[in-house]
Structure formats: structure tokens, C-alpha cells
Image: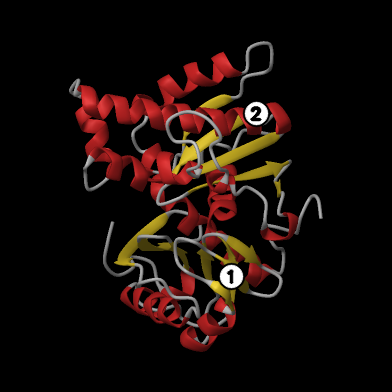
Amino acid sequence: MTGGPTASAADSLIGVDVGGTTIKAVRVDRAGVIVAEQRALTPKPDPSGELVAGAVGDVVEALGGHGGRAVGVVVPGIVDETRGVAVLSANVGFREAPVRALLERRLGTTVAFGQDVRSGAIAEARTGAGRDVDGTLAFVAVGTGVAAALLLEGRAIVSGGWAGEIGQLVLTSGPHAGSRVEHIASASATARRAGEPDALAVARRVASGDSAATAVWQTTVEVLGESLAGIAASLAPTRIIIGGGLGQAGDLLLEPLRDDLARRLEGLRVPELVAATHGDVAAALGAAFLARDAEHRTPADPGPTHS
């Protein structure tokens, strides 16, 4: 859904996800349902955060404005929610950028600031594929980059903002040794390796039996499987939710990934593996929930489970 809101600004909230490629913004009604959506290209790498603040302001205005209510904005990478600072983001280019202050100046309202993957986990836990999980839940976003969030009984492990950066792990064996996980297995890297504009184009080739695309896809599955097996063996989530652009491939990704996990975790508990309900807008929806929490003074992410 695109264009202006079907609910008034007074009765709805806006959440914005600043991705490595695209800024996604949603307007959410009182029931937590997305009623309008806007997308825009993320500005070029922006260490200061100024360009991103301007772009976020533009998409909020395109959605009809915030009506004086809080706006939730989440960004990728290492995020210090307490200070409102994007410490480091390889995909957007932030370096100790005071993003919350810049956004509040541009928008003229309170900004609930957070990290994109933790925000996606919150959305899926509240109204998506994790809403019936009482124990440990993992959410893995496979988009421009690869990152994970872990919720323990609804509380995110933050660890000073450094938790979940599995995409930055360096592969130590195989033909891609020396590369980082997200440089091989992200949605954008999968598309690049197959010579396609996006990962869903690769998925269509795989579904049609294209051998070259299938080889690329299998490598993505194996690299992701190795990363997810580490999460499963060390943290034992009941369910792992796959989001981001690659998660939209559904069982074409999930079925071989389940097989790969079962092989790697022989003798251990294998988590349930499912696609995100909210697709690639999970983080934006979670950002709207953060805005609602900020207005009610009950943070969705009360801080790190472990310091």
C-alpha cells in the first residue's frame, strides 16, 4: 500500500526503517495495522547522518506528517539507543552519528530511535510469526546485510548495541574464506553473485531449474546455515524467523535451509525455521511500535539482557 494515510495522523503512528538500500516508512493505526506505506532510496553513505535525516523527513511528509505524535526510526548496524547515536553502520556509512538529535530537529517531534533488526524482532514477536512463542525467539534479517536479534521472554539482548552482528563474521574455510557472511549470503550479495538486480530474480531462476542460479543459491544456504547453526547451538531459540528481502523467497529458501540446519545440529535441538509474517516491512512496523511505547513511557526494549 502506498500514498497518504487512510487513518488520521492523530489516530496513527509512523515507523521508519532506514535500510542499506531503501528507506521504508509505514503508517500504523491503533490496532497495529499498516494503513499506508512509502519508500525512497537511502542516500549515499552518510557518516554524519544529515542526509538520512533529511530523507526521513521527506518520507514522513509524504505519508501525511506525524501530527505532533512520536515517530519511530530504526537504522542498521551498531546502535546506542540510550545516547541516540548510530555508532557504526557499514551499509549506511554512519560513524558516531547523533541520528536521534538530527531527526528530532528535522521532524520537530519526539523520535523513538532503535536498531532495525531488534525492531523487526519486536514486530514479529507482537503481531507476527513469533507472537505465540513464550521462550527464546531469534529474528534474522537477510537484506542488504545479514544480522540477528534474540528475544528472551520478550526482552532483547543488546550488549551495548553489539549483539547480533552475524553478518560481520569472517568465513574461515571453503571457496569464500576471508569474506564476511553478508558479503556472500545477504540478499544483495546473492543477487550480485548471480548477476541479477535483486534476490527474488535469482529465486525465480532457481525455481525454473537454472543451474547457475541454483549453485549461487546453494552457497547462500550453506553460509546462512553455518551462521544460524551457531545461534541455535549457543542460544537454543525455539524458533528462528527469517526476514528481509531474502525471506520473501519462502520455502525455496527455508526448505534447504532446514535441511542444512538439521545436518549441522545432529543430536541438538533444531529450531523451527519460518518466514517473517511482515516481510521486509517488519522493522518499520516495529519502529511504529517503538513510537507507541515512547508515548506510553514503556520501552519495548528495556535494555540489554546481558551488559
Color scheme of the displayed model: secondary structure
Disc 1: CA contacts within 10 A as few (<14), some (14-19) or many (>=20) = many
Q: Amino acid at mark 1?
A: Ala
Which residue is rendered at x = 79% and y = 50% of the image?
305
Q: Is residue 127 visible?
A: yes
State the residue lying farthest toward the right. 307
Pointers 1 and 2 in contact (CB under 8 A)?
A: no
**Residue 217: x %, y % from top left:** 33, 29
Image quadrant occupied by the N terminus: bottom left
Among the two numbered marks 1 and 2 on one chain, the one whose residue lies closer to the N terminus: 1
Q: Secondary structure at mark 1?
A: strand
Is 268 positioned to the left or the right of 96 in the image? right
Nearest the camera: 131 or 93?
93
**Residue 166: x %, y % from top left:** 58, 44
As drawn, 183 above or below 42: above
**Residue 65: x %, y % from top left:** 39, 79
**Residue 46: x %, y % from top left:** 44, 75
Image quadrant occupied by the C terminus: bottom right
Nearest the camera: 131 or 195?
195
State the residue lying farthest toward the top. 267
Q: Amino acid at mark 2?
A: Ala
Which residue is rendered at x = 52% and y = 71% of the image?
94
As drawn, 35 above or below 43: above
Q: Which residue is mark 1?
A: 86
Q: Which mark is residue 232?
A: 2
Nearest the camera: 159 or 304?
159
